[in-house]
Image (tube, rainbow, N blue to C red):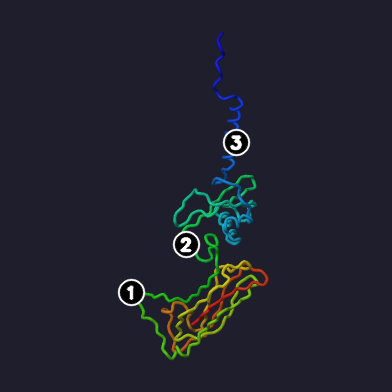
């Protein structure tokens, strides 16, 4: 009597299990494919997930705002927002790469993953996306030497104020200066007066002590605005382009800035303010 041939393939139960596992893997893979990227983990909710990626609340908000713009979403579009760590996909170089992925949940149930990239040097202290933003001071006074030809030909000689004007000049120097910023809007704060030999400014500078404040923000930085006492004189700018005066020139120093975020009792702290 012929023995039946033994079945050497997978048992029916194991085949069904293998198929189920394969189907589950495909399902999970497709579920992870959203928008323009692949979600490798569950996104952390915004803004709670900001700290986990090492972002301050201000920088995180700027990152989400840029991602929203890049994704083509309207500012008032109803979306949920989540955060993912940067992936290894996309362009990368020594100059930068992806810093985060922002996941937008849309009203129709679909999702969009928008990577946020940073390359090169951040665009100034007010670039809140590619660096932690810091408050900084600036002024219109410069010592750029204008040359019409190859230096030293065609370049002006170094400015040397006369000794009598040097002796009569009165600089303005403050070790500290505290400015309350409890209201929103543009500020013009008079700091004080100074006089300069022959109208020549050697130094106009200050340091911001609390340059990453949590209780207020100044958009565009802080301008040290030096205004001539004589209204007929040209504004202070490049010292080589501005005509000198005999003796000393008096001027008033103002702080000009715009507060865009604030809270009760907020104060801008400056130090080492010099106008001479």
Q: Which of marks 1 and 2 is nearer the N terminus?
A: 2
Question: Which mark, residue 24?
Answer: 3
Q: What element carries label 2?
A: loop
Q: Which residue is drawn at 49% across and 62% down?
A: 122
Q: In x, y percent, where is residue 79?
A: 63, 51
Q: Which of marks 1 and 3 is nearer the N terminus?
A: 3
Say few, some or many: other residues with alpha carbon within 10 Å of mark 2 (under 14 / 14 to 19 / 20 or more).
Answer: few
Q: What element carries label 1?
A: loop
Q: In x, y percent, where is residue 228?
A: 51, 83
Residue nearest the observer in this picture, 26 or 181:
26
Q: Is mark 3 on a helix, strand or loop?
A: helix
Say few, some or many: other residues with alpha carbon within 10 Å of mark 3 (under 14 / 14 to 19 / 20 or more).
Answer: few
Visible in this render: residue 230? no
Q: Which of marks 3 and 2 is nearer the N terminus?
A: 3
Q: Quadrant of residue 55?
A: bottom right
Q: In x, y percent, where is residue 95?
A: 45, 57
Residue nearest the observer in this picture, 167 or 6:
6
The residue indicated by pointer 1 is: 151
Visible in this render: residue 254? yes
Depth check, mark 1 against mark 3: the one in front is 3
Q: In which quarter of the image is residue 211?
A: bottom right
Depth check, mark 1 against mark 2: the one in front is 2
Asked if disc 1 and disc 3 are in contact, CB closer than 8 Å, the reply is no
Q: Quadrant of the N terminus?
A: top right
Q: In x, y percent, where is residue 7?
A: 56, 19
Question: Which mark, residue 121?
Answer: 2
Distance from disc 1 to disc 3, alpha carbons, whole Å, reads 73 Å
């Amino acid at each position: 009597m012929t023995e039946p041939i033994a079945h050497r393939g997978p048992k029916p139960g194991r085949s069904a299990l293998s198929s189920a596992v394969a189907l589950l893997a495909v399902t999970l893979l497709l579920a992870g494919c959203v928008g323009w990227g692949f979600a490798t983990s569950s996104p952390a909710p915004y803004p709670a997930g900001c700290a986990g990626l090492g972002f301050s609340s201000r920088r995180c908000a700027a990152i989400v705002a840029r991602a929203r713009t890049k994704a083509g979403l309207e500012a008032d579009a109803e979306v949920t927002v989540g955060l993912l760590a940067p992936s290894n996909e996309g362009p990368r170089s020594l100059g930068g790469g992806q810093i985060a992925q922002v996941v937008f949940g849309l009203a129709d149930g679909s999702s969009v993953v928008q990577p946020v990239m940073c390359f090169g040097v951040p665009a100034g202290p007010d670039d809140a996306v590619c660096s932690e933003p810091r408050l900084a001071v600036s002024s219109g006074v410069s010592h750029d030497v204008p040359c019409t030809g190859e230096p030293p030909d065609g370049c002006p000689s170094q400015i040397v104020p006369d000794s009598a004007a040097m002796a009569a000049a009165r600089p303005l120097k403050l070790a500290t200066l505290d400015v309350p910023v409890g209201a929103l809007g543009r500020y013009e704060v008079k700091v004080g007066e100074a006089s300069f030999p022959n109208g020549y400014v050697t130094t106009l500078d200050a340091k911001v002590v609390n340059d990453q404040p949590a209780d207020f923000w100044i958009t565009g930085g802080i301008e040290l605005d030096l205004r001539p006492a004589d209204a007929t004189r040209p504004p202070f700018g490049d010292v080589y382009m501005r005509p000198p005066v005999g003796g000393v020139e008096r001027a008033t120093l103002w702080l000009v800035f715009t507060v865009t975020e604030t809270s009760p009792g907020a104060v801008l702290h400056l130090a080492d303010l010099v106008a001479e």
